[in-house]
Image: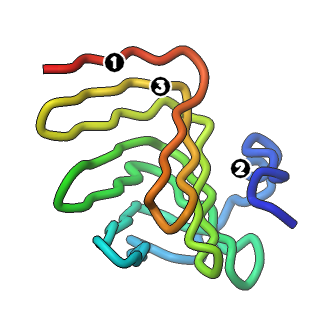
Amino acid sequence: MSINDFNFKNLEQNLSNVDISKPKFTINNEAKKIYITAKEGNFIDKNVILLRNNVKFKSNDFSIETENVIFDRYKQTAISKTTALFKSEKTTIRAEGFNINDKGNKIIFHGNSYIVLK
């Protein structure tokens, strides 16, 4: 099952308890590490976790903040369908969600997006 197959609203309604407090994960690729933190997490299955509340992705090059993310530890992918704020040295993007694929080498923003280039 792909993380794209999960329905965020159904997941949140069915998960009232927290499996992980202040979870921390890392996406590793050849060039960089992306550190992931959140206030809460729930296991959907062995490798897939719903991260909730103040979810942050941070690398040396950028940061992304959002409220809910489904993260696949094995595939090193993430998807969010909540408002996200991406910041780097010369770029800011506000979008309605995003996908992180290819171990963090590819980030695709969804929905209405607002981009500022400096």
Q: Position of residue 23 (x, y in %)?
A: 43, 74
Q: Residue drawn 74% across and 59% down?
A: 3
Per the model, the C-alpha gap separating discs 3 and 1 is: 9 Å
Among numbered discs 1 and 2, the one appearing first in the sequence: 2
- Count neighbours of disc 3 (C-alpha within 10 A) and say few if under 14, some if 14 to 19, many if 20 or more: many
Which is more foreground, mark 3 or mark 2?
Answer: 3
Q: Position of residue 21 (x, y in %)?
A: 44, 73
Quarter the C terminus occupies: top left
Q: Nearer the viewer, residue 84 or 103?
A: 103
Three-letter amino acid code at the position of disc 3: Ala
Q: Residue drawn 17% across and 61% down?
A: 60
Label 3: element kind:
strand
Q: Which residue is disc 3 drawn over?
A: 95
Per the model, the C-alpha gap separating discs 3 and 2 is: 21 Å
Say left or right for 101 vs 59.
Answer: right
Q: Residue 99 bears which disc, if any? A: none
Mark 1 vs 2: CB contact within 8 A = no
Q: Residue 12 bears which disc, if any? A: 2
Q: Which residue is disc 1 drawn over?
A: 115
Image quadrant in which you'd find residue 71: bottom right
Per the model, the C-alpha gap separating discs 1 and 2 is: 29 Å
Say left or right for 90 vs 22.
Answer: left
Q: Residue furthest front?
A: 30
Q: Position of residue 1 (x, y in %)?
A: 87, 67
- Count neighbours of disc 1 (C-alpha within 10 A) and say few if under 14, some if 14 to 19, many if 20 or more: few
